[in-house]
Image: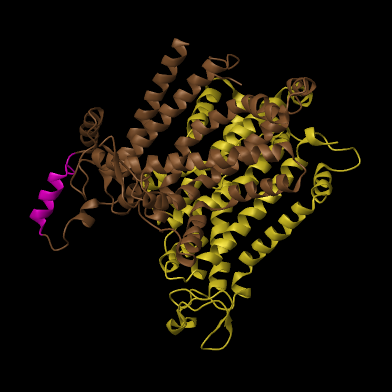
Chain colours: A yellow, B brown
Amino acid sequence: MSALPDTVIVEPLATGAATETPLGRIARDFVTNPIAIFGIVLLLLVVLAAILAPFISPQNPYDLAQLDVMDSRLEPGSKALTGGTYWLGTDDQGRDMLSAIFYGLRISLSVGVASTVLALLIGLTMGLAAAYLGGRVETLIMRIVDIQLSFPAILIALILIAVLGQGTGKVIAALVTVQWAYYARTVRSAALVEKRKEYMEAARCLALPPSRIVFKHLLPNCLPPTIVVATVQVAAAIALEATLSFLGLGLPITEPSLGLLIANGYQYLLSGKYWISFFPGVALLVTIVSINLVADQLRDVMNPRLQK
Amino acid sequence: MLVYIIRRGLQSVVVLFLMSVLVFVGVYAIGNPIDILINPQADQQDRERAIAALGLDKPLPEQYWTFFTGALHGDFGKSFVHATPAISLILERMPATLELAFAAMLIAVVFGIPLGLWAGLRPNGIAGRTIMAGSILGFSLPTFWVGLMLIMVFSVVLGWLPSNGRGPTVDLFGLIPVSFFSVDGWRHLMLPATNLALFNVALLIRLTRAGAHEALLQDYVKFARAKGLTNRRIIGVHVLRNILIPIVTVVGLQFGALIAFAIVTESVFAWPGMGKLLIDSINVLDRPVIVAYLLIIVTMFIVINLVVDVLYSALDPRVRLTESKG
């Protein structure tokens, strides 16, 4: 239930001042808010932890040779038989939770990012097609988008999982299906505004080929609001994947994402062994909050109406 | 108006039909329930008898037709696992889910609107900022994890509230079992309802704050102040009444979402509602129940959306009744 409201409609970016590139202006405005800096630093740490997981983890949690069942379900801070400390405790198979979280972040982030990128590509194409071609194509695409957005994401995802079956590829497919409609709607509304502007008219008067008009002129100007939506959606996708995995309908046990780690600790919760669920949840929360903080600031920075 | 309702109604029927085909074909294309349902030691003959008894030997279009005509009569087939009609299984569980959703909505309204109003009236105060920061957390926290943490704190550590189940139920009108008539029922309801409400508390805080923020700048508020009305009357009557329209709409629309999200909460708290039934059914490939559940909830959504749309255009004449093109 952690998706932000989906009505993030941002006006396209106005042309930056003559002396600096739009990107430069965005970067300069972005760092004016200390909370946003905190968010992006946090996010960088999370991403670094995910990328560097094999190098910074105290153990490889999926190498059976490194696990010791004697060490299972130890409290945070316990000493391992082989020396070393389990700072966040161990799970039922003697896995170091800290290492499991680093590896879990890897999986959660890659599933979230992969599905967002795929959905973004589909959504961009559909949104641009709807806005540029108009007519029947537009009616058809937007009707599908409207219908889809009238159902909550989790319901669509569950229907798809029930229909497609389980597996990593299928979870990504479900996440993509859930998300593309948001991009399609955002891109279309931005493109409709851009389409009427003079530079588009000029491009048409120059008799540029349509592909050039769409990809070189229309597309770049529709990107700012789409990027904001995409940032929010990465967080939503990660949360949705975790929820599906927690319900036992997401990733297979061979891809232990944060959601699966939390689900695994669920059965030990009632006997007071909180750490198996608690710490992966904190990692998930930190990831989602940091992405949302960055998205919040991006939305403000990229909205010319809020410029002083 | 009538044309609009008819057109929207027809559109809903088409969506429902497409959904039924998609769900039916999809659900029936995955896995083979026979492998799960039948004793692995059964011989070929028993196997075939079971397949024939479940109607799984017929071609897919014929299976769909049987299902479709049955569904129109409210018959979604018998559950493979429970051997009772799927529809009655779901209807049996529905009161639990509805009760949970109502309780969650109540919590969301009782906490969300006053907190949002507070944050809107004093946007720069410490309380206002804290409330807004809290609402970001409400959006970001994964529901299922919050549920686990509620169990950990209130059931395991403090031991105040039970962590699962519904507790004793009392039959309302001798028909519908509900748990909010007994103290123990309330105690069971408390944690899951709070968990489910969290997202909507955050949503209502944001909506109310934005509404109040905007309303305070309006001329009618200035005029009310100029008339010398008390602050309480200005807020309670003039501001609140004007910001309620969008809030009521969202509460209506979110009710459907609550029923969908109850799937997660019910799984965490072992609440015997229809969401938990769905998850259990997916795990054992109990096709009739999966299909029946999905179609019932899709129907609920279509009806809720239709009602909200029609009400909205009835309440607000500015809403165009033609198909939106822009």
Q: Is residue A88 visible?
A: yes
B241 vs A107, nearest the viewer: B241
Quick check: A199 left or right of A263? right
Residue A251 occupies quadrant = bottom left
Q: Does residue A266 show up magenta in the picture?
A: no
A162 vs A262, nearest the viewer: A262
Q: Is residue B323 visible?
A: no
Q: Residue A228, how many percent across, how many down?
A: 68, 42
Which range is magenta? B43-58
Name the residue rendered at 37%, 55% in the picture: B270
Specify the farthest residue to the bottom. A82
Q: Residue A155, how many percent across, how many down?
A: 44, 42
Name the residue rendered at 40%, 57% in the picture: A248
Q: Residue B186, how many percent across, how many down?
A: 41, 49
- A254 w.r.t. B284: above or below: below
Specify the farthest residue to the left. B45
Quick check: B139 left or right of B285? right
B155 vs B146, nearest the viewer: B155
Name the residue rendered at 63%, 74% in the picture: A56
B33 vs B122, nearest the viewer: B122
Q: Residue B53, how many percent across, how many down?
A: 12, 45
Quick check: B224 left or right of A112? right
Q: Does residue B55 show up magenta in the picture?
A: yes
Total labels drawn: 0
Looking at the magenta stretch, what is its main secondary structure? Answer: helix
- Quick one: quadrant of the C terminus of chain A? top right
Specify the farthest residue to the right. A19
- B135 w.r.t. B316: above or below: below
